Each structure stands twice: as C-alpha cells, then as structure tokens.
Image: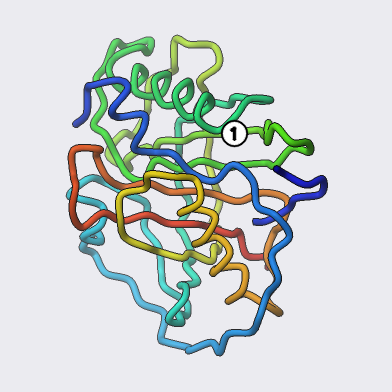
Amino acid sequence: MCSKGRTTQGWSTGNLIMKAFIGITCIIGIVVEGSVLKFVPSRRTTKKPDFCNKLDCPSYNVESSTADYELRKYDPSRWVSDVTKGVDFQTAQNTNFMKLFEYIQGNNVEKKKIAMTAPVLTKIIPGPGPACEDDFTMSFFVSSSEHNPPKPLDKTVFLTSNSTMSVYVRSFPGYIRSINQWLEEAGKLAKALEGKAYVKDYYFTAGYDSPFQLLHRHNEIWFLAEE
C-alpha cells in the first residue's frame, strides 16, 4: 500500500520487451543513515560505458563516488518522450514503451527508422492513494548523430531537451522480476544520501538491456541532485 506524501524516492517483440523495464511504483517513508563520500577526480572517457551495450547513450562526468552511488554530471541532451498519468506502473510502461518504439521504427513525419539508444529512462511523480497511480514519463535518448530528429506522428509523443544536470545514481545488476527489487535498491540509495540535497518530488528508473540479455544486466535508480 502506498502512503500519502510519498516523495522519493535492436528489439522487436512486444510483451517480452515491455516486461524488461518494470520499475518502481511507489516509495514508502524510508529511514536514512549516513554514508562517507569518497571524492574522486572528475573523469570522462570518450568510450561509452560497457553497460550501454554498444548503443549510444548520454555523456557524463563522474564528479564523486562511494560504494553505494555515483554523482554524475550529464551533458545537455535530447530525448523523445511519452507521458501516461493515473495508472499503475506496468500499464504505463507498456503504453509508453510501445509508443516510443513505434516512433524509432518509423512512426514519424519522415518515416525514418532511428537506432535504439540507452537508457530507457522513466521519470516517476508519485501519486497519493493505495493504487499507486502515479505520473510516468518514459524517454529514449536521442543520439547526437540525429542532428534534426523527425517530429513524431503520434500527438502524445514529443521531443525534449535537457540542460546539464547532476544526478545521484545507484547501479545494480540482475534481471528485475519484481517491484520489490527496485524498492530495495531505492531504499539503499536514500540511506546513502542522508544529509545530501536532492529532489524528493520525483525520481527515475533506468534500464539498459534487452530482455534477451540474461546475464551481466545493468539497472539504475536516479535521484536528481539539487544545485
């Protein structure tokens, strides 16, 4: 059951693909404890991280890290997004993913096929009530090679731009088979961030892998850092 005031927190085969991106539905009042921050030099590599699976993904610097999380500073980026409101997470994921997948498969004004990227990012704004009917914005990263991405034909799909942003990221392996796995990792991130300033009104889940990849999977929880 969700409590009011909850604040923190290619492919082609339809149902199997969609099930790969199950994530958090709601986060319930998490007690937090401290974590010692280990500062490391800001670092950037020209090579994309291995967890991007040879797909294009957004560039970032690692500003600092601990055993529990990284603080990443992302470069400005572009995304194609879709929003579903007032439904459960599974329904939202199914709906949003297929609309975005159709866009990159040619449901755009140029009928252009666009390469899959990583991650599949979902912003979740928690809603009150026992049904966990939150607002979900799913986004696919738009590669920098797409200099002028085509306009979507679906009126609910839209192109967006993000400025530079800093996020606390907890990474973890495994095939996600239940919501409780996401909740557990989100709780660990919240604990580690005691005393840190971050946005608690919404949060993100990030998935990097095809459902056909059974091993060496990479999942992330993101909390937006407050400047």
At label 1, the amino acid type is Phe
- Compared to residue 83, the image places residue 198 above or below, namely below
- Compared to residue 34, the image places residue 77 above or below, namely above
Q: Position of residue 119 (x, y in %)?
A: 36, 45
Q: Residue furthest right?
A: 4
**Residue at (42% x, 87% y) in the render:** 40
**Residue at (46% x, 54% y) in the render:** 181
Q: Which residue is mark 1?
A: 136
**Residue at (78% x, 47% y) in the render:** 3
Q: How many marks?
A: 1
Q: Position of residue 45 (x, y in %)?
A: 26, 69
Res 191 → quadrant: bottom right
Q: Quadrant of the C terminus?
A: bottom right
**Residue at (50% x, 51% y) in the render:** 180
- Compared to residue 126, the image places residue 198 above or below, namely below
| 146 or 63, nearer to the observer | 63
Q: Position of residue 16 (x, y in %)?
A: 28, 27
> Callout 1: helix, strand or loop?
strand
Q: Quadrant of the N terminus?
A: top right
